[in-house]
Amino acid sequence: MNLGNFESLRFFYPEAILSGTILLLVVLDLLLKQKKKLAYLAGAGCLLSLLATLDLYGAPSGWLFHRMIVLDNFSLFFKVISLVATLGVVWISLSSREIQGVHQGEYYTLLLTSALGMFFMASSTNLLTAYLSLEMVSLTSYILTGLLPHDRRSSEAALKYLIYGGVASGTMIYGMSWIFGLAGGLDYGRIHEFLLQEGAPRLSLFLAFVFILAGFGYKIVFVPFHMWSPDVYQGAPTPVTAFLSVGSNAAGVAILIRFFFPVASRLVEEGDWLFVPGVEWPHFLLFMSILTMTVGNLCALNQRNIKRLLAYSGIAHAGYILMGLVVLTSEGLKAALFYIVVYLIMNLGAFLVVVIVANATGREDMEGYRGLAWRGAAIPAVCMAIFLFSLTGLPPLAGFVGKFFLFAAVIKAEFYLLAVVAILNSVISLYYYVRVIKTMFLDLPEPADPEVTMSLGHSALLGVLSALTVFFGIYWGPLASYASQSLKFFVK
């Protein structure tokens, strides 16, 4: 199926609903006095778009808008992830004191616009749409990061994010220009055909791929494109930090897989992939995976700010996800997709606890969590312990199952060194996660430490996320099956 512009609109209604909601938010922001209603409208728009996306699972796969984007199970999977992440962040934002102090209309408009950009990142099959969608997400993220008025940390974080993003974007588009000059086209199918030719200049192509990886890697926060992450995570409003850590990173993985697997690789029997000879990008990713998880975990060891700790933790987890791509098998990709889902649940829950504590104390440092379980916040403390143990990879939690799938795929492909490094890094991560848990349960609170309360909405979401973390650690079959079905790329 290769549809033109008007025929493609029949399969474009999730994006149309999201776009309509964005426009409606802009108009109603001028008319409504109670700005909280805008949050409910944003949530309703995301929910309707999610239902429309799920409805597309029965539609035939194919190219849309003259091969600019594609409709297949892989793109639908990441659209669902983006919408679930956005819904969760909208829910968190409802009772966040940081968000109550910003312009509500602009905030929710930018949040949904970023989610729309993630849609296109997951379904782009042309370097032009890939670049424009990534920039759409990046530009809205810069503004969201600096949205806190009169907050120096927020402004500084936005400026650093903009500078790093601009450099990564320029490097990426430079690599894309090389690909366009060599292949004579921007379409992924045209590039794949060129790569299979005997006379293709392998060194030039490899360098172009490295330049493109700089842009993708800055979105996924793998080393050495990670340097913006800790400062941005600390300075941005906490709901925005949660959004960047789960939604933006997942979209980065989507655009990376979409480019390097159907384009720079070819599917062979039994679900294995072979990279194009002479363009050994998996070896580069192998080195990046080891470096990313190691740097992330080592830098997290001495962090006192919880948001910075979770930022370095996110860098380490990006390294774990890259493991699934390195092995060039469907099992590895399935493990990566599975881990993206459970990481979304775990990290969103951890940042929700950060919001709850910040609302009550105004603090994000480790001392703000001192004796948390004995300050009226036993439930958030227990839930935080569940999320942190799951991020470590301890059974019987979802993070353990996710890491088990990743390690199993790596060992089956005989990447033993990568498996050993990943296991050692998981052991290292236990130290800084347990340090937070020890502070919450074993350190005695001081008289100056305030009581911690939470809203009904935050309580409900915390219960859902912690229950899912335990549930998928015990009964992971449906999620694993969903991840496996989402590996259907339309490449004809």
Image (cartoon, grey):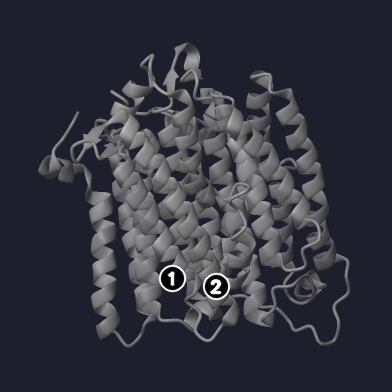
- Decide which of 9, 311 is in the foreground and name it: 311
Left or right: 85 in relation to 196 = right
Residue 397 seen in this snapshot: no
- CA neighbours of label 1 inside 10 A, class few (<14), some (14 to 19), many (20+): many
Estimate the x, y position of residue 394 in percent, counting from the top left. Answer: 75, 43
What residue did someone put label 2 on? 237
Quarter of the rendering occupied by the N terminus: top left
Which residue ends up furthest to the top in the rendered image?
269
Select label 1 or label 2 by which is in front.
1
Q: Is residue 195 above or below residue 157?
A: above
Left or right: 430 in relation to 129 = right
How far apart are labels 1 and 2 at the CA level?
Answer: 11 Å
The first of marks 1 and 2 along the sequence is 1
Q: Which mark is residue 366?
A: none
- Decide which of 281, 364 is in the foreground and name it: 281
- Residue beneath the point at 88% across and 74% down: 444
- Residue beneath the point at 80% across and 56% down: 301
Q: Is residue 193 above or below residue 20?
A: above
Residue type pointed to by label 2: Pro
Q: Which mark is residue 143?
A: 1
- Decide which of 146, 34 is in the foreground and name it: 146
- CA neighbours of label 2 inside 10 A, class few (<14), some (14 to 19), many (20+): many
- Residue beneath the point at 61% across and 45% down: 318
Residue type pointed to by label 1: Ile
- Classify residue 58 by image quadrant: top left
Estimate the x, y position of residue 117 in percent, counting from the top left. Answer: 35, 54
Residue 436 seen in this snapshot: yes
Estimate the x, y position of residue 253 in percent, counting from the top left. Answer: 49, 42
